[in-house]
Amino acid sequence: MAREINRLSARKVQSLTEPGRHADGGGLYLVIEASGSKRWVLLYRMPGRRREMGLGSAGVVPLAKARELAAAARAQIADGIDPIEAKTAAATAPPPPAPVKFSDVAETYMADREKTWRSPIHRAQWRQTLEVQAASLWTMPVAAIGTDDVLAVLRPMWHEKAETARRIRGRIERVLDAARVGGHRRGENPARWRGHLDVLLPQSRKLTRGHHKAMPYAKVPAFYAAVAAGRTSYSSLALRLTILTAARSGETRGMVWGEIDMAGALWTVPAERMKGGRQHRVPLSAPVLAILASVLPDGATASDLVFPSRASTPLSDMTLAMFLRGTDPNGYTVHGFRSSFRDWVTEETDFAGDLAEAALAHLVGDETERAYRRGDALEKRRHLMDAWAAFVAADSAAPSSTRASSE
């Protein structure tokens, strides 16, 4: 019985030259052709027939490997499986589906929630945080993402950009939760904070929010003139429009041509893009209309952004902030120009304070008083915004007719 299997040796396989079958045992044979070529075959029986399975050239497949292949085939035979048929089926089977990537789940998650988000800027921010700032995860199989992968994204910014890091962590966690519910991964969420990442990462410094530093209104005309002098980039024009309309930065950056009525000199910001969730109508002064005319492209559609970035997404808040900082390094903020406007109304004009508050889209009066105030004093506010524009842009030239850029 000892000689029933493993009859050959590696040296004998090399030295044998006689044509024919040379048994190793268990149905494994070394076949030598008349030409001298050598190959391995496995002879076996399935119900009703005798079969011969090729296992490869002896010059490529060594004896030990041939025995492994024969043993695997014999195990299939013992289970009633024909190894030749199994091999053929495997060769013709369609390839397994590609693994679901983090980006696949993120794209679906964003698309499903896009209509519930307050503005188009929100989706752009989600894409920026996930596709750019969490780029190392974007193309990974979502099932393979672990704690170390999440930490590799968060650690470089955890202290320097604490609020951004917290926001990214939360968004990664939500996408990975969606992947688990969708059956694309199992186990704990590696981006979970409580009881997981809070053990590995120190509590980051929370951003202390105070008042937005506002430029004194008396300095605004000179600053505006400096910005207007030969500047035709979208960031410069968007900043000028924001100042002239006393709008929030996000309202300007998300502005689309469908919100603008050039003939009626009116900008209607839909409720979903307003902080207070209410539609806001903004009368447009002559300098604002000139800015809009300078950037109006041929064939613009209602959904086209007025001030797109190079990637055709809304300009980032940092873009305007950096432009302001580069023009005036005193730490003033874009949002602070709303305070500059409000101080100017109080100190330099006879316009009612309620009118200024309405121009800033602030609620005026208690709930009962607002219920009886049906209008938005649009025409009165038009006079106010014309006066503000005259003050701000008195020493500035009209916008250049040169096509604006997304710089």
Image (cartoon, helix red, strand yellow):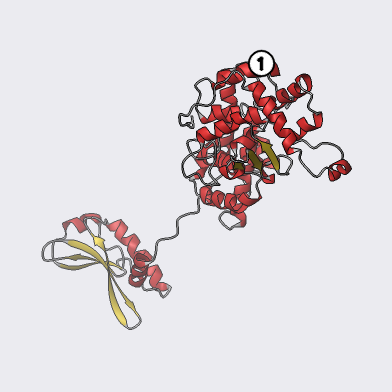
In screen coordinates, is 70 left or right of 192? left
Which of the pair 85/107 is nearer the observer? 107
Which residue extends farthest left? 35
Residue at (72, 29) in percent of width and height: 384
Which amino acid does the dot numbered 1 rest on? Answer: Lys
Residue 216 seen from this side: no
Q: Residue at 71% across / 44% down in the picture?
A: 279
- Crowdedness of circle 1 by 10 Å Cα count: few (<14), some, many (20+)? few
Judged from the image, the secondary structure of the residue bearing numbered disc 1 is: helix
Residue 89 or 315: which is nearer the viewer?
315
Where on the picture, by quarter, is residue 222?
A: top right
According to the image, label 1 marks what residue? 219
Q: Closest to the observer: 10 or 393?
A: 393
In the rendering, at what x and y percent does residue 145 appear?
54, 46
Above or below residue 349? Residue 21 is below
Q: Position of residue 332 (x, y in %)?
A: 66, 20
Check the image and report above or below for 346 versus 290. Answer: above
| In-image side of 402 versus 344 (left or right) | left
